Image (cartoon, rainbow, N blue to C red):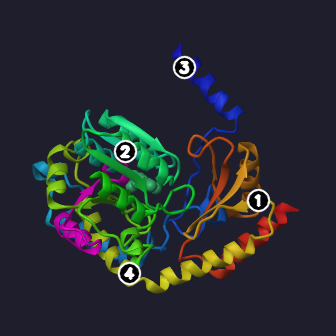
Amino acid sequence: MPFTELQNELNERAAQGLLRQRRTLDSPQSPHITVDGSSYLSFCSNDYLGLANHPQLIAALQQGARQWGVGAGAAHLVSGHSAAHHRLEQALAAFVNKPAALLFSNGYMANLGAVQALIGKSDTVFADKLNHASLNDAMLLSRTEAKRYRHNDMAQLAQLLEQTKTGRKLIITDAVFSMDGDLAPLPELLALCERHDAWLLVDDAHGFGVLGEQGRGSLAHFGVASPRIIYMATLGKAAGVFGAFVAAEQIVIDTLVNHARSYVYTTATPPALAGTVLESLQLIGEGDALREHLRELVAQLRSGLAGLPWKLMASDTAIQPLLIGGNQAALALSEGLRERGIWVAAIRPPTVPQGTARLRITLSAAHSTADVARLIEVLHELAH
Ligand SMILES: *Cc1c(COP(=O)(O)O)cnc(C)c1O
């Protein structure tokens, strides 16, 4: 039976400390969660501004359901594209300073669709080796030649671009690397695009809402703007809701509407969600105090963990990974925290490279300084 093979593969994963298992939340997403009946202080959501359970957004979703019902009922190109979706697309484009935007069901599908629609067999994609899995899968789907460069290595990227003489060129990168928390050098990337007539797809899943003036994201953070930039961000992280969008020149968006298979062949997200994201956009824009508090928590954590045997990776963002190394060691530390009421997931290969298992600590504006002090205290206790 093929089941025996599957079982052997899972057993092997378990033996290497790589088996994945889910835990069940019995509470809304928040710094204080209930999991399998016990309460925990959590440091592993991407709800960076604490909006996932915000009363104003709950009210917007309820109001949206009254106005639009619950399901979109059809794909955008059939009869599923509502005025709520349309208004949100216009607001998102304006918010990130782009001419047009297109909503996708989620970030994974947005990346698949954008790369597949813009790049064909005779073109080339250039990708950072630490990009998110969805960008890697997007390259596979586009059946194009993929050239991966060492993390943030602009010299190597320049060389690869130099060697590529024909076809369209697309550089794809996380803006904030999801498992590392560091930033891609967007000004340098854009300069390379200009020199080599390439496009730049920026995945701002972890920058949108958090970085830049009014939380407008990584482009605003770096002060870069160009028609060459195709901007993608998710709406289920800092925005606290669900979904994703691509913002770009109108002609790029028209191309995606026609050719992005993950856009065309799927049901539109519920219009009530679009209305909720519109409300979230308002909160993000007004959220300077939240972002300031988040920055203070990052500084508190970094100075508090300075003396530990494990090192925090170089990051200024809300993603603060503590590098452990071995899979079992990372799991053991995560378990030690759990026994003391703190929830931080161990991130292991293949999500991160071999030998770099880590605790991916994420901070949220919803955390208090007392929450972060507790994490610091328990990690010191576990180190001794
Ligand atoms: C989370 C994430 C995605 C996927 O977004 P979803 O909306 O969760 O599907 C894409 N890229 C990066 C960098 C991410 O962190």
- Decide if residue 160 is on the left or right side of residue 196: right
Neighbourhood count class around disc 2 (C-alpha, 10 Å): few under 14, some 14–19, many 20 upward: few
Label 2, secondary structure: give it: helix
Label 1, secondary structure: give it: loop
Q: Position of residue 116 (x, y in %)?
A: 27, 41
- Decide if residue 277 is on the left or right side of residue 357: left
Amino acid bearing label 4: Gln
- Mark 1 vs 3: CB contact within 8 A: no
**Does the beta carbon at disc 4 come under 8 Å from ligand 1?**
no
User: Alpha-carbon distance for marks 1 and 3?
Assistant: 40 Å
Q: Compared with residue 78, is residue 30 higher up or lower down, i.e. above or below?
A: below
Which residue lies at the image location 63% right of the left edge and 45% below the top edge? 348
Residue bearing mark 3: 3
* Label 2 or label 1, whichever comes before in sequence order: 2
User: Does the stretch in magenta take in 97?
Assistant: yes
Q: Position of residue 382 (x, y in %)?
A: 82, 61
Tag in front: 1 or 3 = 1
Neighbourhood count class around disc 4 (C-alpha, 10 Å): few under 14, some 14–19, many 20 upward: many
